[in-house]
Image (spheres, rainbow, N blue to C red):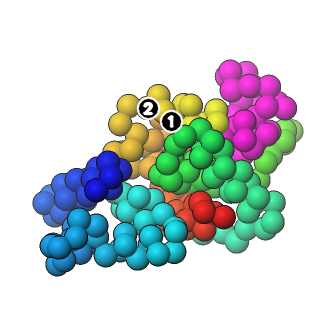
Amino acid sequence: MNIILRKSLLAVTGLAFAGGIAAGPVDAMLSNPTTDTPAAVQADRTTDRPARDALIPNGTMGEQARITLDDEQKANVKAIVDATKKAGMDERAAVVATATALQESKLENLGHLGDRNDHDSQGLFQQRPSSGWGSVEQITDPEYSTTAFLKGLKNVDGWRDMPLTYAAQAVQVSAFPEAYAQWETQAADLVAEHWTS
């Protein structure tokens, strides 16, 4: 059993004993003791898509939002996924990054918005040149801005074990710290779709 799966199962097991989850990957393992891999994970392997428990290991918080994406937004998801792989990070990191970009820009690579701008925030992650994220040219480059976000995420101690919205907030320091939570399901779906494409 790989380390990521083992950590995910330990997290799920802890939640199950705390009363948070009544059925799920642990139950699948217990019902089939001859394997060390849950049935849901085995099914995902046949499609080469990341397992759902790797994408959303702790469940979602609150109501989930969803938007329809145009071709530019889809290309930006692909750029986030590719930059995550290039950085040597896993599917969960791509989900956190994608959910963050959904909240910050709806996956649109925004330039300066004049009076509607939050200070000098720009790009997919609404990063600010004045806060040290990079130049305007850099932070409006999807690969650069994703890599910058992921560097921040790597520095968040225990980010894999915390709810997505807390991990994103630790990097972004938003005035609306719980807003990222609503995008977790769509972000996971998008990462699953693009991870192997």
**Residue 79 placement (x, y as % from top left):** 71, 51
Q: Quadrant of the N terminus?
A: bottom left
Q: Tags 2 and 1 in contact by the CB under 8 Å rule?
A: yes
**Residue 29 placement (x, y as % from top left):** 21, 71
Of the pair 193 and 22, the residue shown nearer to us? 193
Image quadrant in which you'd find residue 172 = top right
9 sits to left or right of 75? left
Mark 2 and mark 1: Cα distance apart in space = 5 Å
**Counting other residues with Cα less than 10 Å from the Cα at mark 2, is it few (<14), some (14-19), or many (20 or more)?**
some
The residue under label 2 is: 156
SS class, disc 2: loop
Image quadrant in which you'd find residue 33 = bottom left
* 148, above or below 98, in the image: above
The residue under label 1 is: 153
Of the pair 19 and 2, the residue shown nearer to us? 2
Query: What kind of residue is marked 2?
Result: Val
**Residue 111 placement (x, y as % from top left):** 84, 41
Q: Which mark is residue 26?
A: none
Magenta span includes 50: no
Instruction: Find the magenta span and give its range.
Output: 118-146
